[in-house]
Amino acid sequence: MAVSLLDRVRSYVEPLILVGISISYLPITAVLHPLLLVSSPTSFRAKWFENFWRIIGPKMAASEIQVEHIDELLSRARGAVLELGPGGGDQMYHYRPGQISTLYGAEPNAFLHARLAEMAAAHGLGGAKFVALEAAAQPGSLLPALKKAGLVPATTSTLPEQGVFDTVVAIKSLCSAPQPQLAATVAVIQALLKPGGEFLFFEHVENSSDPVTMSYAWLLGWFWPLFTGGCRLNGKVDRIILGMGGWDQRSVTTTGDFRGHEVFRYVKGICRKT
Ligand SMILES: C[S@@+](CC[C@H](N)C(=O)[O-])C[C@H]1O[C@@H](n2cnc3c(N)ncnc32)[C@H](O)[C@@H]1O
Ligand SMILES: *[C@@H]1O[C@H](CO)[C@@H](O)[C@H](O)[C@H]1NC(C)=O
């Protein structure tokens, strides 16, 4: 499948533009939060990402090639829902609040929480219907937060056999979770689902069919995470899902007109726990 040089260059420039935009928020953040810069580099990075994401998040959430897929996924969310990495709540408008009892948003970046709660309330998930958790997706962060919130018993080391959530959602957030722990993270997501519950995801993943793109992504990988809140370009959630049991239905599809040379291959997943 021949790809024109122009198409290739275009798709290689795309991530560089994002890095450029992110860099432009660095001096503003440093000027506004000099104390954070010296006292806590981790908080400074989180603040920097928040400034960047407040502008870019809504633009990305409006991206025409993604909107209908994300709507298809989030319109399925029902009952007790756990969303991993909801950011500033830019995808909230896809939820059908009438079929949701409570939405738990596990967002590790606390600077995004105020906007997240605002967006939830603005889209029919206000008051007791939305609970923000300051937690990341990996088990070492998620499970203590679920225990603290009383969703998982604090005293036992095993998860409730009947599950906890009807739906678990991840939209472009698992790329920022620690990749070596991704299989364990997905296993815990499955364990947290009630029988018949669904894991819904929309993520960009690696595609190894084009060696030139693989090499380019490898090069980018040296600095990309620094400017994108820890995002990785070589996600494998699709392969992990396809390689594990415990789902009675599972559909993992590449979206858009992916041709192999792009840095981002977006996949949509609908997985129903047995
Ligand atoms: C690209 S943004 C997407 C936000 C939102 N899902 C959206 O589509 O607008 C990635 C989000 O993942 C969060 N994140 C970072 N590390 C994470 C982790 N280890 N587990 C879960 N979420 C994480 C970031 O704070 C950020 O809000
Ligand atoms: C690359 O993407 C194509 C198109 O979606 C898919 O058929 C193929 O299995 C992918 N290859 C890998 C190794 O992920």
Image: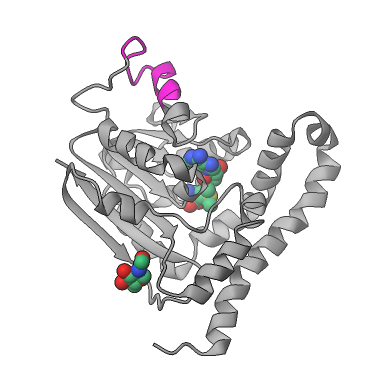
Q: Find out whether residue 149 is within the magenta segment.
A: yes
Residue 155 at x, y percent in the picture: 34, 9
Depth check, front residue: 239 or 122? 239
Q: Quadrant of residue 167?
A: top left
**Residue 72 appears left or right of 5:** left
Depth check, front residue: 54 or 177? 177
- Give above or below for 90 relative to 5: above
The residue located at (62%, 64%) in the rendering is: 219
Magenta highlight range? 143-156
**Where does the N terminus fall, quadrant-wise?**
bottom left
**Residue 193 appears left or right of 196:** right
Whether residue 90 is visible: no
Whether residue 172 is visible: yes
Q: Find out whether residue 64 is within the magenta segment.
A: no
The residue located at (49%, 63%) in the rendering is: 62
Residue 232 at x, y percent in the picture: 53, 53
Q: Quadrant of residue 81?
A: top left
The residue located at (43%, 66%) in the rendering is: 265
- Give above or below for 14 relative to 76: below
**Residue 19 appears left or right of 136:** right
The residue located at (25%, 54%) in the rendering is: 242
Quarter of the render that holds ligand 2: bottom left
**Residue 220 appears left or right of 169:** right
Residue 26 at x, y percent in the picture: 77, 51
Residue 58 at x, y percent in the picture: 55, 56
Number of residue marks: 0
